Image (tube, rainbow, N blue to C red):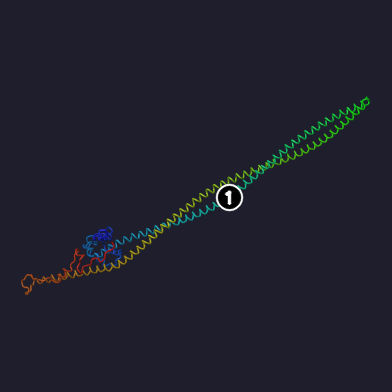
Amino acid sequence: MAGAPPPFSLKVGHVFDAFTDGKRGVTVDDICAGFQKAALEIPSADLAELHSKSDANGDGLITFPEWLRMAEQYPTLMDCLYYRSVDGAAEQEREKELGDVHDRIEQLRRQQQPMHDNVLAAEAATQDAEESLQELKRKLSQFQNREHDIREEIDAARNATEQSRGGVREALEDLNSTKDAERQAHATVQEAINQVEKCSRRATIQSNKVAQAEESVKELEKQLLEARRRADDESQTLDHCNHELQEADGRQQESKMLHQEALRRLHAMNERIAEAESGVKRKQAHEKELAQQLSEYAAATNRHAAELADAERRLAASCAAERQQKIDGNALVDRIEREEARLMRLADEHREIIARRELTNAEEQPLVEKELNLRKQREMLEHNEAQLNHEVSAFAGRTQRSPSPARGGGGGAGKRPSPLRSFSARTSFSPQDRHSPPILSPPKPQYERRK
């Protein structure tokens, strides 16, 4: 049945195996060591006497049959040795378990320190990554601002270049207009020259005609009036031609002045165009330089953006590693706390069991001593009984050899039993009657250990 105490033979065999440790029998040293291990304070002389009494054949070893007879004579002692042996084994298991738990806690604590160092290293790496990320962000912001400024400068340079090109186009238009005006002035001058030449020719012709007319006046008196009239007409025509020649000269001078003004304007326009083209070239060169700087800053921005992305990945990995280290550290701390709680619980249970064991030992020690004393008293009484029986037998022999007259020849039919024999019958003890012994027999175990 579950929870029932083990059989008596199992207890005896367990204690015998614990005392012999695989040997054939139990020696005096084995009994002393076993009782010392069981924390039973029995004098060595009493233990040696107990071994001597139990060693029936006197070979120095208590074999199992002899051990079984001793157990039947000392049931309380055997129960005490059995339960103390079981408790000792259980205590060793508990101590071993306590040691294992303590070792696990120490191992976990040794693991906790590198893990704590790893957490600190991960936090430092995370902080370094964050600082590097902030520095990269700052540099990237600077490069982006510089890139924005360069783009604005490029836009301004492009606008200025467009304005210069517009000025060049306007100058070219003015130059073309001036060239057109110059061509027109040249055409006007040429026309004026042609008119002057024509007027000169006409004047020459008229002068010739006047000379002819004057000669004709001389020759032809008749035609004097008419000639004078024609001469006057021709003179008027000559004056008119001279006037036209003067006007043509004036227009020629004016055309020359316009031509010179047009040449000056053309020269100024050429200088403006050259200056504008030089400015356009300088601005284009500046624009190219800015474009090159923009390309460099764009490459640097892309490079810093890649470094920033890599730093962000490292930061994320470092944060993940830090979180994992913290999770592992918390899990390790939880394990340590659970193991410490288990260690405290086992230690409390161990102290409680030790306290109960000490209390039980305090109760068992007098019982074992009482059983040993009772056994000594019983052996003494048995010795005295044997001596009295011997004396009674001797007295009965003497009585039979010399019968009393008072008894006659009744042959002992009415003989009363000897009081000593009645006492011997009452105090006899056998292993089968150990659970219901007489008054002077060892008492049965007065306790039952925990199941």
Along the horizontal axis of the image, is 407 left or right of 359? left
- As rendered, which of 121 and 292 lies closer to the eye? 292
**Image quadrant containing the C terminus:** bottom left
- The local secondary structure at tag 1 comes to helix
Q: Which residue is mark 1?
A: 141
Along the horizontal axis of the image, is 89 left or right of 269? left
Label 1 amino acid?
A: Ser
The quadrant holding residue 360 is bottom left
Residue 12, x across and y down, in percent? 25, 61
- As rendered, which of 44 and 68 lies closer to the eye? 68
Q: Is residue 200 above or below residue 162?
A: above
Along the horizontal axis of the image, is 403 left or right of 337? left
Residue 253, x across and y down, in percent? 82, 36
Res. 243 in view = yes
Residue 377, x across and y down, in percent? 22, 70
Residue 334, x across and y down, in percent? 42, 57
Q: Is residue 143 above or below residue 10?
A: above
